[in-house]
Amino acid sequence: MKAVYFLLCLALARDSAANIVRQQLRPQMDTLFVQPLVNQFQQTYQETKQQHQSESTSYESKESKEHLSFDDISDYPSLFQSGNRNWNSPVFSSYITKGDQIPYADTIEWQGVQIAAGPRSPVKSKKDVERIFRDAYKSMQHVSEDEKRMIHKTFEEIDQTTHEEVQYNATQLLKHHGYGVEEHIVKTDDGYLLTLFRVQPKESNEILGENKRPVVLLIHGILGSADDWLLMGPKKSLAYILSDAGYDVWLGNTRGNKYARHHASKHESHPDFWQFSMDEIALHDLPAMIDFALQTSEQEKLYYVGHSQGNTIFFALAATLPEYREKVAMMYALSPMVYMTHVRSPLIKMMAPNSQFYERLHEQLGHSEFKPSKEVIHTVGGNMCEKEIDCKHVCSNINFVMSGVDTADMDFDLIPSIVAHLPAGTSTRVIKQLGQAVVSHEFRKYDYGFKINKKIYGMRQPTKYDMTEVKVPVALYYSEEDWLAHPKDVERLHKELPDVKDFYKVPEKHFNHMDFQFSKKAPEVVYKRLVESMQNN
Ligand SMILES: *[C@@H]1O[C@H](CO)[C@@H](O)[C@H](O)[C@H]1NC(C)=O
């Protein structure tokens, strides 16, 4: 009897060992991302290579040259067999970004979005894809083939002239344009070190008289930084306009962005550094920056201008700590992103805990910095963007892919600078918190799950931020095609806030989330109104 068991065990062990070996040799296809299938890949490799070679004489578009040639992957079998397959390696990524020239695995496609199909794929039908992308697709500008060609042409011209300025940090940008600047490091009560930029007036010898310049604090949006208020240059970007109008302009940075990556004891390379959501940004970073700007300028109150998440965190703070309501003379919210019920951004919809994409994306994104791979960016809308506007510079950038692209009012000369400065960094938890709001229909603290919520908040659900408590004069500026702050969600916010002085919808058809900072029309349709209101306040 024993011998029988022994043999049986032996057989089982052998079998499972064989399975393990087999599994290692077989590349495991990702269930979400579109990747070449090995067999199909091997079969079509020669064909595609020949085709590629015969085309190569006529095939001279600039973008195609950026990709690896087919010869670069001649060692592909070893890559598959090594067991350390890395789909982010340039070999695979170049395939994945090559569009329809690539032999793909089975896919489900909707308006240019391609998602892997197959038994283990979380996506079962076109409807699943459509549900995520439909709203974003509807509220975007669809450009013609002629316009696409124009965009390409503009880019080729830009590519030839590489400016050093494209990389400038906030200090360099301001100095370059003749403004002085102070760099301050502010430490939050939980140890993060944030850089605050203070803009010095352009005319340094200008006598300002006895009157102090009123303080304005500008807080950037999600995945942004202080740079965003400067990139368009003087007379166009808000920081210069406000400085020229006589304000003491401060540019803030929230933890995790490129100017806020130090901590008294945590290193940015360690996951501990990244364990924060918008709650910590709101309740630790903002108070530190507001207090510092007021103390340094010896003033009692300041004007606050937020873009995107810069508003979310302000409302969270003002709802929670009454003393900060007193410190703000007026709050200007450009694209007030608070309620997410009608959000159109595919990324945020996919990050909603009830979406079938959530598990896989969650796995991909991890628990530290939000740094989506090329495959993630493509899957959350990069490929739809490419199909629509056919511009890799824009469509490989997570800020554009998350917030949408408006080609009508875009200054194409500015794109190299935008993509060099964005994304500026945040935590994955911040993105997850936005996804949670899609399902909860509320503006709440971060949801850790029942067990931990109970310990932290004393109840199973996270604490709500009560918008009726935000007793601060507020101006809400929003727009029709904003993928992140949907007009319906902004209207709800408007109803709840107790003191809205101005509720203004930008009168432009294609004005979206990023346009509040980068559109050619922003100075005319947004900033002018804002500065006039501030001066009359
Ligand atoms: C900006 O760049 C300049 C020049 O490289 C450097 O001296 C300065 O420290 C930088 N400032 C910040 C805040 O990164």
Image (cartoon, grey):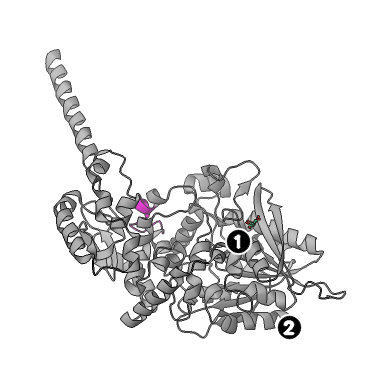
Residue 56 % position (x, y): 23, 64
Q: Hey, which residue is sitting farthest front in the picture?
A: 57
Q: Secondary structure at mark 2?
A: loop
User: Is label 1's Cβ within 8 Å of ligand 1?
Assistant: yes
Label 1 crowd bin: few (<14), some (14–19), many (20+), radius 10 Å: some
Amino acid at the residue labelled 1:
Asn
Q: Is residue 108 above or below residue 408?
A: above
Q: Does the magenta run of residues contain 259?
A: no
Q: Which residues are magenta?
A: 352-361
Secondary structure that dominates the magenta span: loop
On residue 169, the disc is: 1
User: Is label 2's Cβ within 8 Å of ligand 1?
Assistant: no
Label 2 crowd bin: few (<14), some (14–19), many (20+), radius 10 Å: few
Q: In this view of the protein, which residue sits in the foreground, 391 or 517?
A: 391
Q: Does the magenta run of residues contain 358?
A: yes
Q: Is residue 355 above or below residue 192?
A: below
On residue 374, the disc is: none
Tell me which residue sits at (51%, 72%) in the image: 414
Where's the N terminus, which quadrant?
Answer: top left
Residue 444 % position (x, y): 54, 59
Residue 121 is drawn in which quadrant? Answer: bottom left
Q: Is residue 341 visible?
A: no
Mark 2 = which residue?
Answer: 536
Disc nearer the start of the sequence (2/1): 1
Q: Is residue 468 visible?
A: yes
